[in-house]
Image (spheres, helix red, strand yellow):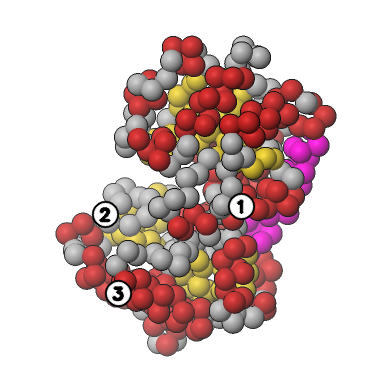
Amino acid sequence: CIRDRNIYNTFKTMSPESIEYFAHCLDGINKSYSCKYCFEKEEIQKAGLPLKFIAAPFSFVYCICYSFLKFLFASHDICIAVNPLNFLSCYMLKCFGRVKKTVFYTADYSENRFSNKILNNIYKSCDRFSVKYADSVWNVSKTICATRKQQGVSDSKNFHIPNSPVLSHFEEYLESEHSKYQIVYVFGTISKSSDLFANHQFDLLMETIDYLVEKEDKIQLLLIGRGNFEKYFQSIMTEKLLKHIRFCDIEDRKVYIKTLCASSIGVAFYNLSGAAHLKFGDSMKIREYFAAGLPAITTPGHSLAYEIKEHQLGFVVETLDDCKMAFEKLLFDENLYSAIQQRVKKYAIETDKVKTILPALEKLD
């Protein structure tokens, strides 16, 4: 039974008839519902009671019990549980002999997950329990791996399973023609204009683009997000900048991948203040940039920024001058761009989801 959509997609590629997917409050028809995957219709469907009507502490207990009962009457070889609450139901299933091996997969982590001290202590206790009793511990970033090692997890059961997509989904588009001056930035859902500055340091990006278009009029910034977010940008941009920006709300996964592969540079800026979990996180958008063969420009502090520096997969910038220099090098130095792009493609192959999961599964045998 799989409880993470990204992991699920990987297993579907490997053995589509042998897995079950079940999740609580993740992407589905309605985020207030639990959801399951229906193989007959190949779609995510609602399951259980609407969680928005259950108060938070009781909804946690409900989720644990619902997962336990959902899988109690069938046997599974492996249960991959994302987050400590899911692992509790996973562990209960093992105690009842319904699961042979358990995996605790940390998709995000924070030393101070909740502002409420009592809730935070409960979270940490559940996390320690999961790490101790799981047969294998998977971590989305190297930073979390290092934390697990400090917690006493042996190397034989401590694995780095990044947010990398399945590379085979990108292969047919990798050799397609790309626009030399197309820069892509993938957003989540933008609910208000202040999000652009609070979460994405958008002012830094806009000042850089304003500088770059003076040097090359063909430069286009492609913004990919969800919903009607264009209005938030139009209210803060000059008419000059708007001529160099395209807005896209892309629902189809194949169209999204093709769009990434047609670009030249991927951008991901983060503001880590007030978002402690980002320090331990693994940026899925940057992983997708790599799968599409795009060098990345990002801000420091998050786990993947260290890998970008270590493997020279792009640039980590802090100031406006850093940002201008990084874009200029990638846009106007073809030899440097080609060298970085080759490293990016090699790294994407090495960190392909299937390649990282298989060694971890073999250790479970």
Is residue 339 depicted above or below 79 in this figure? above
First along the sequence among labels 3 and 1: 3
Q: How far apart are the alpha carbons under marks 1 and 2?
A: 30 Å
Residue drawn at the location 66% of the way across and 14% of the way down = 215
Which label sits in the foreground, 3 or 1? Answer: 3
Could you say where residue 27 lies in the image, as x and y percent from the top left? 38, 50
Provide the residue designation for mark 2.
Answer: 32
User: Do the residues bearing badges 1 and 2 touch, measured as CB atoms within 8 Å?
Assistant: no
Which quarter of the picture shows residue 211?
Answer: top right
Q: Is 70 displayed left or right of 172 in the figure?
A: left
The three-letter amino acid code for the residue at tag 3 is Ile
Q: Amino acid at mark 2?
A: Ser
Residue 229: % across, % down = 36, 29
The picture quadrant where one finds residue 288 is top right
Q: Start and end of the magenta stretch?
A: 338-357
On screen, residue 356 versus residue 144, left or right, reads right
Q: Main secondary structure of the magenta part?
A: helix
Dot 2 or dot 3, earlier in sequence:
2
User: How far separated are the C-alphas under marks 2 and 3?
Assistant: 25 Å
Q: Is residue 210 magenta?
A: no
Look at the picture and state if 333 lies above or below 142: above
Residue at 31%, 71% in the rendered image = 117
Q: Which mark is residue 304?
A: 1
Q: Position of residue 184 (x, y in %)?
A: 56, 30
Tell me which amino acid carries mark 1: Leu
Secondary structure beneath label 2: loop
| Numbered badge on residue 118 | 3
For mark 1, give the secondary structure: helix
Identify the residue at image location x=47%, y=37%.
201
In reply to whether residue 340 is colored magenta, the answer given is yes
